[in-house]
Amino acid sequence: MIEKESTLKRIEELRDHITYHNRRYYQLDDPEISDAEYDQLMTELIQLEKQYADDIDIADSPTQRVGAAPLDKFDTVTHLTPMLSLANAFSEEDLTDFNERIKRFLGTEDDISFVVEPKLDGVAVNLIYENGIFTIGSTRGDGTVGENITQNLKTIRSIPLKINETERVPRRIEIRGEVFLGIEAFKYLNRRRINGREPPFANPRNAAAGSLRQLDSKITARRPLDISCYAVGSSEGITFESQSEVLHTLALWGFPVNPEIKQANDINECIQYYHDMTLLRKELPYEIDGVVIKVDSLDIQARLGSVSRSPRWAIACKFPPTQATTTVEDIIIQVGRTGVLTPVAKMTPVRIAGVTVSSATLHNQDEIDKKDIRIGDTVIVQRAGDVIPEVVKVIESQRNGTETVFKMPETCPVCGSEVVRLTGEVAHRCIDFDCPAQIKENIKHFASRGAMDIEGLGDKIISQMLDGKIINDPADLYYLTKEQLAGLERMADKSAGNLLAALERSKNPALEKFIYALGIRHVGEHVSRILAREFSTLDNLMKATEERLISVKEIGPEVAGSVTKFFVQPANVIMINKLKDAGVKPQETTPPQSFDLSGKSFVFTGTLQKFTRSKAREIVENLGGGVTATVTKSTDYVIAGESPGSKFDKARELNISILNEDEFVEFINGLQLKNN
């Protein structure tokens, strides 16, 4: 009895929590928890309501509603057919169960055909067209009644104001779509808001929602919103047989339809599509948080019907969450190899995208001030793909007055030297070049994979070497003896031998890798490659004047000044001479003789099997070509790996040459033979 009372109390708590967060998410566009945390609350409530179905009334439960009630500031629109939400799946097992439920309901063992779509992270809207003319547009609202945002929707250029005339134009029809904000547009919008002392949006979805709910449509018009249409609701004067036919017709009528949508013959193809999209999502210019799987046949959809708030014939399979809510326990300072002090938030550990995250970069003091991040704050933290975790926004409503404002220290936390902020820079720097933190980071950079690639030289070993004063700069590594290494903790005889062998192997690096290893300010891997190709030898580069450097394509005054300053500093010259005396000799670079590839532009899409993306880029650039991220009319070749995305379709649309990976290899090998 006590357990039952406790559970019924928990049901009421969950309903209150979800109702509160629905309002924050759908009405205020200012969520306080991540989507994943919301999903957990909803899943728990659904399970408990099923368990105690005979003891509770679910009529006003959030599980029976979609979204939230419309805001009072807008007129309301009653949808001709309900806009239902989708049940969620989180694993292959969930998708298999979904398929089996459908088969059981239909009483069949035959495979079911599906349509699979990216799940855009935007705002669902309903567009009504009468005799081909756009008349009313509304939000989803509570699924039955939405907000009339017609004027705001008319500012979105990709929404047709009139259906393209075909033989089949309906008398009246509801078109369903997702309004979204592209990633670059979202970043630009947030930069504008931060610079204007406005709070940034937590994610593109909230930015899109906030834009659609402007009372002044001129504000909406200034925000680059887009739409992807995916379904129809009520229709008069036209019928469809399948979801794929709906999508084909929408495209003919002039509505944007996502190019990544595909048909699947069975659930296994749906599962493969989910995995493909997991890889492809990093390339997409917009956010997706999963995939949507729908039964293709509309007749079967009608037979399956729906349960409470979601249809039986569709499901959303979510990716692991990229955002979560946690607490900033402290803000510490890390000192980099150029002396830059970087504030880092130490947080209560939280799982994001399958990884436990306990720290996030805060970049600099200005960033902290703009976002008003304090020690003790509850925050939304984000980790998208392989990007370093970052704090997206503070949940100010969770503050209790004990939070502490952070200020950058006046002295270096490692060496105690003065910290300065140079004119025109956002960074604070330690000005002591002998700061142990800078020396350590320089050596780590020198030994890293993209630089000298010294295997076995990790963070802890470098720290021990510096603490024991057996090295003071990168050149000292090549004078180490087995006896010196034997004195280090956990450095057995075999490990010492392996490290010395790795150092020996690294003595003849490619010139571009050696230049990058030196850690010259503003000189990354790409610039190092340009310098190596242009000057061929280290000596030539060291003698280059600032004017000569500026004459090189892609080298500007800032890089040129940094390079010349580096090579005139006595300490750097001494270190380079020590490296030469130790037998370190960068390979001379032969300038590329670029025949058919000279000036050609390449774009890669899909998963490559024979190369990493960085290696493929290096090959193209060494032959005189260039690599860009997007397909345009000026693109010469698109290289398509497995599961190519929208870039592939764009290339076909623009009639650009498309090579598969084997054709690319053959093409490159042919050019290299010519060069030899």
Image (spheres, rainbow, N blue to C red):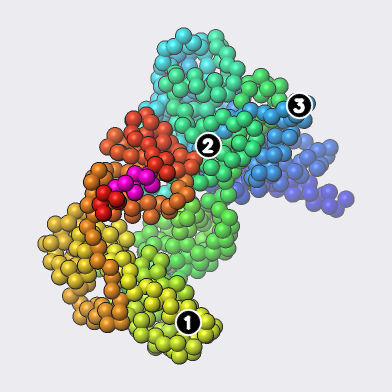
As helix, strand or loop, the secondary structure at mark 1 comes to helix
Residue tagged by mark 3?
Answer: 108
- Determine the residue positioned at 57% across, 64% down: 348
User: Where in the figure is residue 452, as x and y percent of width and height?
Assistant: 36, 70
Residue at label 2? 118
Which of labels 2 and 1 is toward the front? Answer: 1
* Nearest to viewer (mark 3 / mark 2): 3
Quarter occupied by residue 548: bottom left
State the separation of the CA atoms marked 3 and 1. 66 Å
Instruction: Bin the neighbour count of mark 3 within 10 Å (Cα to Cα): few under 14, some 14-19, many 20 and up.
Output: few
Tell me which secondary structure the magenta stretch mostly adopts: helix
Name the residue type under label 2.
Answer: Pro
- Sequence-first tag of 3 and 2: 3
Quick one: label 3 or label 1, which is nearer the N terminus?
Answer: 3
Disc 3 is placed on an element classified as loop
- Residue 667: say if magenta: yes
- Residue 598 highlighted magenta (yes or no): no
In contact (CB < 8 Å): disc 2 and disc 1: no
Closest to the observer, 498 or 320: 498
Residue drawn 52% across and 37% down? 118
Q: Is residue 231 left or right of residue 482?
A: right
Q: Is residue 201 left or right of residue 563?
A: right
Range of residues picked out in magenta: 664-671
Q: Which residue is mark 1?
A: 497
Is tag 2's residue or tag 1's residue first in the polypeptide sequence?
Answer: 2
User: Among all residues in the image, which is located at the extreme right?
Assistant: 1
* Residue displayed at 69% across by 39% down: 96
Mark 1 is on which residue type? Answer: Gly
Percent of width and height locating residue 629: 35, 45
